[in-house]
Image (spheres, rainbow, N blue to C red):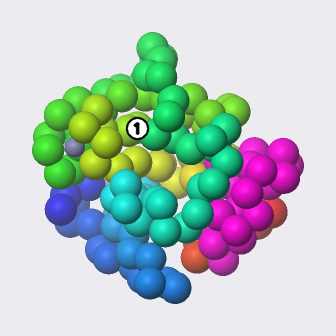
């Protein structure tokens, strides 16, 4: 699988049986939809798969699985790329930490926040 941003091969990172695809070049992350479910986003407010696409002034990217142009979705202040066929989510490195901080400050989903925080050593 290739990085949707810089087209370098993504590397599989595993923790607690959840696999992520990480780009060692631009430090973005791809979550397959199933993997995202495994980290337990129970609160619909923070479930990126229920969000409507928004128009933003940000470059479009293609899903690394189906090559379709991904939708932009906005959660809090974070803008993510989501495959229109719901294959998964792409976080730029700064988007991921923003999402974690956002979710953390809203006390939305501790399990998710802790998981992401630990895996990526994001300072909370
Ligand atoms: Zn990349
Ligand atoms: Zn796709």
Q: Position of residue 40 (x, y in %)?
A: 58, 63
| Residue 22 visible from this viewpoint | no
Q: Relative to the observer, which residue lies in front, 78 or 83?
A: 83
In the image, 30 versus 112, the foreground residue is 112
Q: Where, quadrant-wise, is the C terminus in this rendering?
A: bottom right
State whether residue 74 is above or below residue 57. below
The range drawn in magenta is: 99-118
Q: Is residue 106 magenta?
A: yes
Image quarter of residue 46: top right
Residue drawn at (52%, 85%), measured in percent from left and top? 16
Q: Residue furthest left?
A: 66
The one nearer the camera, 16 or 93, is 16
Look at the image and say whether residue 120 sits in the magenta stretch.
no
Residue 53's place in the image compared with 39, above or below, is above
Q: Quadrant of residue 112?
A: bottom right
Badge 1 element: strand
Q: Locate residue 2 relative to residue 22 in the image: left or right.
A: left
Question: Quarter holding the N terminus?
Answer: bottom left
Q: Position of residue 56 (x, y in %)?
A: 48, 17
Q: Which residue is mark 1?
A: 81
* Horizontal arrangement in the rendering, residue 114 relative to residue 11 (left or right): right
Magenta portion: prevailing SS class: helix
């Amino acid at each position: 699988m290739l990085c949707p941003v810089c087209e370098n091969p993504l590397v599989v990172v595993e923790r607690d049986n959840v696999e992520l695809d990480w780009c060692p070049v631009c430090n973005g992350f791809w979550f397959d939809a199933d993997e995202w479910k495994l980290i337990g986003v129970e609160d619909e407010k923070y479930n990126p798969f229920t969000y409507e696409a928004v128009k933003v002034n940000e470059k479009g990217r293609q899903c690394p699985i189906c090559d379709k142009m991904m939708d932009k979705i906005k959660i809090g202040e974070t803008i993510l790329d989501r495959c229109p066929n719901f294959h998964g989510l792409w976080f730029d490195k700064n988007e991921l930490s923003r999402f974690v901080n956002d979710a953390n400050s809203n006390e939305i989903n501790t399990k998710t926040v802790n998981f992401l925080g630990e895996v990526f050593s994001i300072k909370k």
